[in-house]
Each structure stands twice: as C-alpha cells, then as structure tokens.
Image (spheres, rainbow, N blue to C red):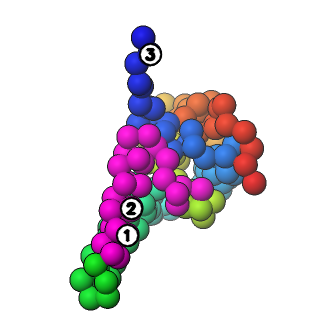
Amino acid sequence: MTVFALPKTTSRVSQFTSRKTNEKILSQTRKAVERYCNADQETLARRLEELDREWDFERAIQTGASLQILLGLALGTFVHRRLYAWSALIAGFMLMHALHGWAPPLPLLRRLGFRTEAEIEQERSALRILRGDFTPTRDPREAMAQARLSEAPSISGAGMEDKK
C-alpha cells in the first residue's frame, strides 16, 4: 500500500526549482556573505535589517494570488459571472502550492530572485557568525559552513533536471 507523502515544507519550493536557478541563488548568497566579511558592526546590522524586510517567495506568491483572486471577484461582479472562475482557478493553484509546493508562477518568481525563508535565513546566519554572534570568524567560507550554506541540501535542487 502506497501512502501519499507531502514534500517537506523547508524544501518544497527549491525542489521544484531548476538546479541552475537554485545554484544561482546560492551563488548570489555566497557572494553577499563574502562582500560583508570585513564589514563593520554597523554595516552588518544594516544588512541584517535589510534581510528582515526582504520578501521571501511565500510572501510574493501569497500577495500575487490574493490580488488575482480579488481581480477575479471584481471581474465576476462587474463584467461577467463566468469570470468568477478566475478566482477559483487561482485558489486551486494556491492549494496545490500549499500541499505540493509547486504553482505556475514558481519558476518565474525564482528566476526573478525570490528566495525561500530558509535561503534568507542562511545568509542571515552567516552574517551573524561574521558579526561574532556565535563562534566568531572572519573567514566567509567558515561562516558559510557554520550557516550550512556550503552543503545546504534544501537549496541544492537535488534530483531536479536542469530546466531552461
């Protein structure tokens, strides 16, 4: 008997992202950490504040879906009743994303650079390590290793074919 298993919450978005896009996001994160390896405390604090305000993938897709559902309701009300179906379609896509991890805008949003919460947290952890919040180091590779950036299986795209 086969039991239907949902993907892990922490890896479901990256699992449906192409390896190339995942590697690009990871590379950009590594470069950001390297840029800040010799930064002073104030500069690191500013970057950490920026990361606190960065929109992650989930926030972007939820906002877009909400706007699309509202559009469908408005079109159904003011243009034609059949346009209510647009809201139902978008709600279905959001349910599919919530359960499975994939939705039609996923590839586009990821290529635009929207990171998952876990990916943002990895950069935040590496910067906090550089700042000395944990085991202090000024070596970006060591900071990334401590933050698990160098081996992050949740953003490696393991098992994904390269999609163009």
The kind of residue tagged 3 is Thr
Q: Position of residue 36 (x, y in %)?
A: 60, 54
Count of number-bearing discs: 3
Q: Position of residue 74 (x, y in %)?
A: 28, 82
Is residue 18 at least partly visible in the picture?
yes
Is residue 32 at least partly visible in the picture?
no
Looking at the rendered image, the quarter that the N terminus falls into is top left
Looking at the rendered image, the quarter that the C terminus falls into is bottom right
Range of the magenta residues?
82-107
Q: CA distance from mark 1 to mark 2?
A: 5 Å
Q: Position of residue 7 (x, y in %)?
A: 45, 32
- Badge 3 vs badge 2, beta-carbon distance below 8 Å: no
Depth check: give the residue in front, 164 or 90: 90
Label located before the other in sequence (3 or 2): 3
Q: CA distance from mark 3 to mark 2?
A: 29 Å
**Residue on which the image places disc 1:** 86
Up the image or down, 129 lies above or below 46; here it is above
The kind of residue tagged 2 is Leu
Label located before the other in sequence (3 or 1): 3
**Residue on which the image places disc 2:** 89
Residue 22 horizontal side relative to residue 85, left or right? right
Question: Of helix, strand and loop, which mostly describes the magenta segment?
Answer: helix
* Mark 1 residue crowding within 10 angstroms, few (<14) / some (14–19) / many (20+): some
- Badge 1 vs badge 2, beta-carbon distance below 8 Å: yes
Up the image or down, 144 lies above or below 43; here it is above
Q: Secondary structure at mark 2?
A: helix
**Residue on which the image places disc 3:** 2
